[in-house]
Amino acid sequence: MRHRLMAAWRGTPDGPLMDLPTLNVADLAVKIAVQCGLANRVKLEDVLAAWEEVVGAFLFKLTRPDAIERGILTVRLMQPSAHHALSLEKAKILKRLQTKLPDAKIRDIRFRHG
């Protein structure tokens, strides 16, 4: 009866409903990410973990990586003294990050207060 009602509503001859496989959203999300090239991107959590190793515990408490856009890592700073210390060591920090996270393709670091 259900098939006949659905067929009448659709305006098609009586027959079984479409037997398409049910897809899981989690599986589709992974496939879409791979197709778009998003699967190889480095997560901010990975940068955060590497950041602590690169700058040390003291500066890690005063700074946080905020975003990576077009190869530029933006780092938020709590104090101006941290900005001065990091700007003096910027080239070394950048080189260490590039060594630790080659897939991130970080080409510059910008420091911002806030």
Image (spheres, rainbow, N blue to C red):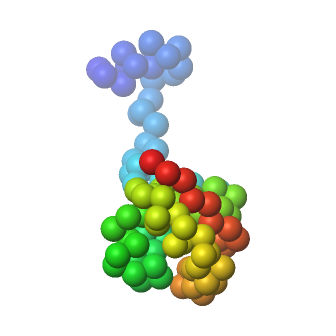
State the image coordinates of residue 41 (x, y, percent, origin top left).
57, 66
Figure check: 97 above or below 39:
below
Q: Quadrant of residue 63?
A: bottom left
State the image coordinates of residue 101 (x, y, percent, origin top left).
56, 80
Q: Viewer-proximal residue, 87 or 34?
A: 87
Can residue 7 be seen from the camera position used here?
yes
State the image coordinates of residue 68 (x, y, percent, origin top left).
58, 59
State the image coordinates of residue 84 (x, y, percent, origin top left).
54, 67
Left or right: residue 15 compared with residue 36: left
- For the N terminus, the image quarter is top left
Left or right: residue 31 compared with residue 108: left
Residue found 49% across the figure and 51% down from its top = 113
Q: Viewer-proximal residue, 59 or 106?
A: 59
Can residue 50 be seen from the camera position used here?
no
Q: Quadrant of residue 69?
A: bottom right
Q: Viewer-proximal residue, 69 or 51?
A: 51
Residue found 42% across the figure and 58% down from its top = 79
Left or right: residue 32 compared with residue 105: left
